[in-house]
Amino acid sequence: MDDKKIIFSGVQPSGNLTLGNYLGAIKNWVDIQHDYHCIYAMMDLHTITVRQNPADLRRRTLEVLALYLACGIDPKETILFVQSQNPHHAELGWVLDCYTYMGELQRMTQFKDKSARHAENINAGLFTYPVLMAADILLYQADYVPVGKDQMQHIEICRDIAQRFNAIYGDVFKIPEGMLSKSGAKIMSLQEPTKKMSKSDENPKAYISMMDDMNVIAKKIKSAVTDSEGVIEYRENDETKAGINNLLSIMSAVTGKPINTIVSDYSGQGYGTFKSDVAEAVVEMMRPIRSEYDRIIKDKEYLKNICAEGLEKAYAISGRTMRKVHKKIGFIQK
Ligand code: ATP
Ligand code: LTN
């Protein structure tokens, strides 16, 4: 084994991926893939914490994989697999449930948000979601977990659970660290820019889907909510500037230019020109990804083969951790 560190992350196939998922997570995965051993999964076990239509879930799981590939993830270097196909995730999830306190889970922001949004279905899986996520990460002894800002609280609880377990049984789990992308870690809704852009928002104008047509993307950006001040300036803690702050963050994440440079490039200009330029930059970034995606998604055999190969490698790694856990806890070896 070389001394490259291990990366684990994943996205739920709960809807069409958004510009937020891309800029906050996947783009970063692509940028770092040669410097680490990377393992990325389609998190379908997490997805069923909210009711899903089975046919849609099946289709979306392969769509998410096709998007990872279209964005530039190299399946020869990276392990890609479907979470539910590796039984170790649910298995370690159960064990870790017994080392997690109700009080810790009650504090999770995502649980509070999702239970407010799905009041008719506040199930136990939604509650223990972060424990399953901890199992995902700890199974692979990951050093880093590249995610958007909204997931950092889940990384913190993962570290707490791992440290608690290690304190009892010795060094079983590597303690992972979250990894935020330099820009784009939190892309906001285009309609309510104080809320994060989310693929499950009921208003499709609020998010840019990776599946949107290029003219739809441009239209959504041009009709993004801003303010009436007419000044292009980044003011982090000023809520009235949330719309412009967000467009500046998007522009910066897409072009790689620092926000300050963009602000000075547009000094004295109106929102119209700025929005058109942001729209064009996003469209130009998405166009090649879309055409690659359209090509890859047709080849279901290819996609299924990648999952099968990835699963075999993932299962071997997670099996080592699982055996260690069984032994430490006192389960009888097979
Ligand atoms: P849902 O709306 O179904 O909860 P989501 O859009 O939040 O889903 P996830 O699958 O939960 O997407 O997240 C996948 C990855 O994308 C995570 O690393 C998450 O932090 C990141 N991410 C999601 N939304 C954003 C956003 N608006 N800005 C930056 N990163 C984001
Ligand atoms: N909760 C994550 C998806 C996820 C994940 C993980 C991310 C599930 N398990 C393990 C990183 C590592 C989300 O993005 N909402």
Image: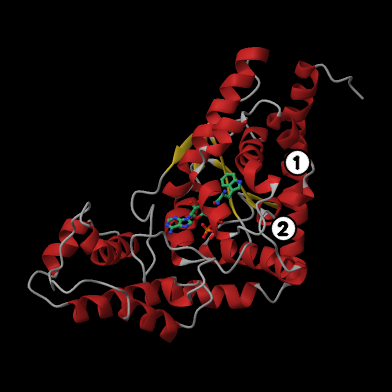
- What x and y, as percent, mark residue 195? 39, 60
Q: Residue at x 43, y 55 (%)?
A: 24
Q: Is residue 269 above or below residue 117?
A: below
Q: Nearer the viewer, residue 109 or 38?
A: 109
Q: Nearer the viewer, residue 332 or 227?
A: 227
Q: Is residue 225 above or below residue 126?
A: below
Q: Earlier in the sequence, mark 1 or mark 2?
A: 1
Q: Is residue 171 above or below residue 202?
A: above
Q: Residue furthest bottom?
A: 215
Q: Is residue 110 above or below residue 317?
A: below
Give the quarter of the image for residue 328: top right
Q: Nearer the viewer, residue 104 or 53?
A: 104
- What x and y, as percent, mark residue 74? 58, 56
Q: As drawn, is 161 to the left or to the right of 278?
A: right
Q: Residue furthest front?
A: 120
Q: In what quadrant of the picture does the C terminus appear?
A: top right
The residue pinned by badge 2 equals 306
Q: Residue at x 7, y 73 (%)?
A: 268
| Residue type highlighted by circle 2 | Ile
Q: Residue at x 49, y 51 (%)?
A: 29
Q: CA distance from mark 1 to mark 2?
A: 22 Å
The residue pinned by badge 1 equals 90
